[in-house]
Amino acid sequence: MRMIFKQRIFTWFDSYDIYNEAEEILFTVQGQLSWGHCFKIFDSMGNEVGIIKQVVLSFLPRYEIYINGSYVGSISKEFTFFVPKYDIDYNGWHIDGDFFEWDYKVIDSQGNQVASIYKEIFKLTDTYVIDVDNQRNALATLMLVLAIDAEKCSRNN
């Protein structure tokens, strides 16, 4: 399953639309007023399906993940040189990035690739293409992309 993640232009808070290849909206993401980044994720019917919140007082960047109102775990950036890595503490996944921080692979605990993420360059706003091997991993993978993009945004400000 392929998802295209596009940031909206001219909004007060970060907002995103996530499309399938037929350009149908799968999810919308609304940034919330908060100390640190906070995003609410809605499905195509407008139902809230997830929240991702930045943990502000932590040594390395960390984001809490809530699905259907319940806390499920967090994603944390690992201390590395040159190549970014992220750890997800609730499903055994980890994320390996490339030197330029444009391409990422989501790997499960058995070493299998769950998803690939790459940033499209030369776009007016942040745009990512997300290829997910299993549709039930779409929301979890989307939340990882939000955390990565928020972490990069915080670092660049």
Image (tube, rainbow, N blue to C red):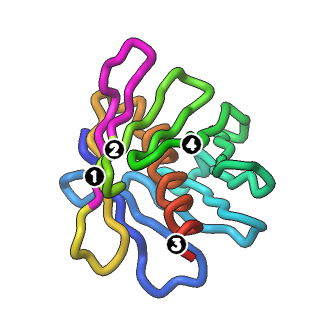
Residue 125 place in picture, x, y as percent: 35, 76
Mark closer to the chain start, 2 or 3: 2
Marks 3 and 1, the one that precedes in the sequence: 1
Residue occupying the point 36% across, 44% down: 97
Lower position in the chain sequence, tag 3 or tag 4: 4
Region of the chain picked out in magenta, as a range: 105-119
Instruction: Find the residue positioned furthest to the bottom.
Output: 10
Q: Which residue is mark 3?
A: 156
> Hey, what amino acid is under mark 2?
Tyr
Residue 109 covered by magenta stretch: yes
Q: In this orientation, which residue lies closer to the viewer: 151 or 131?
A: 151
- Distance from label 3 to label 1 (Cα)? 19 Å
Q: Secondary structure at mark 2?
A: strand
User: Would you name the residue on which mark 1 appears?
Assistant: 118
- Residue 19 can be seen, yes or no: no
Q: Is residue 116 visible?
A: yes
What's the residue type where badge 3 is placed? Asn
Q: Nearer the viewer, mark 3 or mark 1?
A: 3
